[in-house]
Image: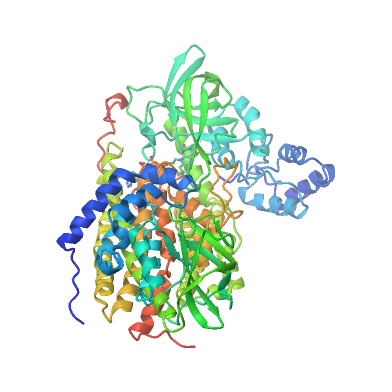
Amino acid sequence: MSTTGQHPAVDADELRRRVRDLLDAHPPATTAPLDFLRARFDAGLAWVHYPAGLGGLDAPRSLQAVVDAELAAAGAPDNDPRRIGIGLGMAAPTILGFGTDEQRQRLLRPLWTGEEVWCQLFSEPGAGSDLAALATRAVRDGDDWVVDGQKVWTSSAHIARWAILIARTDPDQPKHRGISYFICDMTDPGVEVRPLRQITGEAEFNEVFLTGVRIPDSRRLGEIGEGWRVAQTTLMNERVAIGGGRVPREGGVIGLVADTWRERPELRTHDLHQRLLRLWMESEAARLAGERLRQQLAVGQPGPEGSAMKLAFARLNQHISALEVELLGEEGLGYDDWTLRRPELVDFTGREAGYRYLRAKGNSIEGGTSEVLLNIIAERVLGLPPEPRTDKDVPWKDLPR
Amino acid sequence: MSTPDLLYSEAEDDLRAAVRSLLTDRCPPATVLSEAESGRAHDVALWGALGTEMGTAGLLVPDKLGGQGATAREAAVVMEELGRAVAPVPYLTSAVLAAGALLGCDTGQEPVARLLGALAEGRTVGTLAVPLSTMAGVSGPPAATVRADGDGTLSGQVSSVAGAAGADVLLVPATGADGYGLYAVETAETSVTVEPLTSLDLTRPLAAVTLTGAPARRLAGPDRAAAAIERALLTGAGLLASEQLGVAEWCLTETVRHTKERHQFGRPVGSFQALKHRMAALWLELVSARATARYAADALATDSPDTPVAVAVAQAHCAEVAVRAAEECVQLHGGIGMTWEHPAHLYLKRAKSDEIALGTPGRHRQALAGLVDLAAPTG
Ligand SMILES: Cc1cc2nc3c(=O)[nH]c(=O)nc-3n(C[C@H](O)[C@H](O)[C@H](O)COP(=O)(O)OP(=O)(O)OC[C@H]3O[C@@H](n4cnc5c(N)ncnc54)[C@H](O)[C@@H]3O)c2cc1C
């Protein structure tokens, strides 16, 4: 989505000028981080490809890198994108695409500054890969919807102010058609968040119970019954967000392992050497593929490679962290901490090899499993015939469950 | 090389049935998890039933020394079942490694015989005080990090010792004026500290052992100690392959069961060919893993000259099969496989630590290179 044609004025030089103005008016050294972030949003330098007034300048998306580099060089605070990943990666593009002006004005700024964290109330115990089978009900009651159901594996729900939520509003329709998309206030009565401990020992995700939660109709995104289409936007953005960050060479987990290799000659063996080199090469290849994807997007040639990046990231993260544990040998037998914690973000680099190894197992499950993504590539990219579907035109309420 | 027996005998099948039935009753995944979280070194009651009452603690110990007089073949069957249950008991550390090291000492000596008898009963728990990652050497026994002083005491530290926390006796390799030796130290001594470490494998906790002038009894001197320790480590590695087989087997069985029952898109997820083929491929790997584990057990049991090759092949192969099976188990369970309540993580953690325990697959392949004359390129 390139908008350069409409706004030829906003080029790299213009952005640099605006960054300088921002820094002059709000010197990072003397400005409270939150005030700086708000000012940055208001200056249109938050996400430059967003519309003016909503944190952007309708500039080409690729120019964000220019802004980020200038601000980083000036020591400006950042908005901790890892902590607010769901908001940035999934809620924001969906609100932008389907929200009313009022919703966009109210929600996007605190989302971007990190004042308000978002979570994603999609998956349910009975509906994971087959998300459209979800059973959480939303029943109209005057100007409100009354929501009942259970969500699961909800990352960040314990710190979230808002949630994107999909719920069934018409059980008589086939499963993809009777779904609507809402914004749920996590502080409302009837929302109960319970920690769900995971393989790493911590509880980064949660179970969320929704009991008679009243959501005003003004917090619906998209048309009634059109929630699946809205969710598609979220999910596509989720996959790109997960695989899509710009990284320098050795920027990921491979860098940690490479450093260990360089610093610890006593750990080296021929076997590990060959495997490390292969993974290093594959990481570099994946990094370049990601860079190429970004360049494609910048010149308005979006390709289907987005899902490929998420797949590659998951596979590499798993293989590299597995090698790291093995490389460490005796140290790999240990673990840093099994305490049940409720962290605010997934800290891949702040913890030890065992944590990385275990947490990486989730990379091929969260945001759509690798198997399901491979099916999507096979069917949508390669045009292979889909698996036979028995549930397409059957009303949801008549589906076997 | 005579033809190895790669099948299970009737007696071995009976032993398996008895062990499995005990573990099914007393050691379901929920118990393993709560036991692991309890901070206890191992499940004492379970070990009493399995090691003492059922007699598995003494399988490798000859009758005349108070054991069952069985062989590595039977011990391997027990290891398979323990792997299948990720059981928190000191079988590998006490009944295999410690007993194995003592069997390499002069069992005609009273202290050796007495300790062996006590371990065989299961009431006394021992372990070999070496880091769990130690591999039976291509280049000799593990260097001792403990010093034997003239006054019959030991001082020094050993890191990452499995089974130390629940042990009554540590078998410690140490060097002193008399050279390399194997010593017995009681953990009850105040000069012995066993500090539990946070371990990746919750079901086989590690500890750091510190000795500060600990009274010790020498069980073997330079003439026997090295060989005894080497043999114990080789036996441990060979039998660990059977544990890995058990881990892999549980993972495959449970994944098949789950994917048959879990419905998405209106059908069992196991009906998707993408998953079917992966489970079938895993089954194929298990077929060969079982053969290599059985061969290692048989070679150890018959004292075959091919034992080092058999152990290297079994370890290099089974370690990887177990890790792959556990990783597939987590993945094919989807989100539920990432949770603490579901036992998949216990198996993944066991498989991953077992991969490092007693030599990584890479190091076993390297050992194999020397054993079968396939030298690495030089330069
Ligand atoms: C760490 C983590 C964080 C998460 N965070 C969130 C969150 O914040 N919000 C949220 O809504 N959800 C979240 N999820 C849930 C996640 O999206 C689901 O777990 C995922 O979509 C898989 O669904 P499932 O767990 O029900 O697995 P299932 O759908 O039961 O899948 C089981 C297995 O079957 C395979 N399978 C299923 N269908 C097919 C098919 N058609 N072809 C081939 N194989 C198939 C799967 O790939 C998997 O291996 C999170 C999950 C994890 C692990």
- Does residue B226 appear in the picture of this structure? yes
Compared to residue B146, the image places residue A343 above or below, namely above
Q: Residue at x 38, y 59 (%)?
A: B323
Q: Residue at x 25, y 56 (%)?
A: B280
Q: Residue A399 at what x, y percent from top left?
A: 27, 29
How was this image coloured?
rainbow
The furthest residue to the bottom? B379
Instruction: Please state which of residues B239 and A401 is positioned toward the viewer in this rendering.
Output: B239
**Image-quadrant location for residue A249:** bottom right
The furthest residue to the top? A142
- Does residue A373 appear in the picture of this structure? no
Left or right, residue B276 beside residue B232:
left
Quadrant of the image containing the N terminus of chain A: top right
* Ligand 1 position by quadrant: top left
Compared to residue A305, the image places residue A140 above or below, namely above
Left or right, residue A143 beside residue A382:
right
Q: Residue at x 34, y 86 (%)?
A: B373
**Image-quadrant location for residue B292:** bottom left
Instruction: Please state which of residues B14 and A162 is positioned toward the viewer in this rendering.
Output: B14
Q: Residue A375 at what x, y percent from top left?
A: 35, 49
Quadrant of the image containing the C terminus of chain A: top left
Q: Residue B101 at what x, y percent from top left?
A: 39, 72
Q: Residue at x 70, y 54 (%)?
A: A69
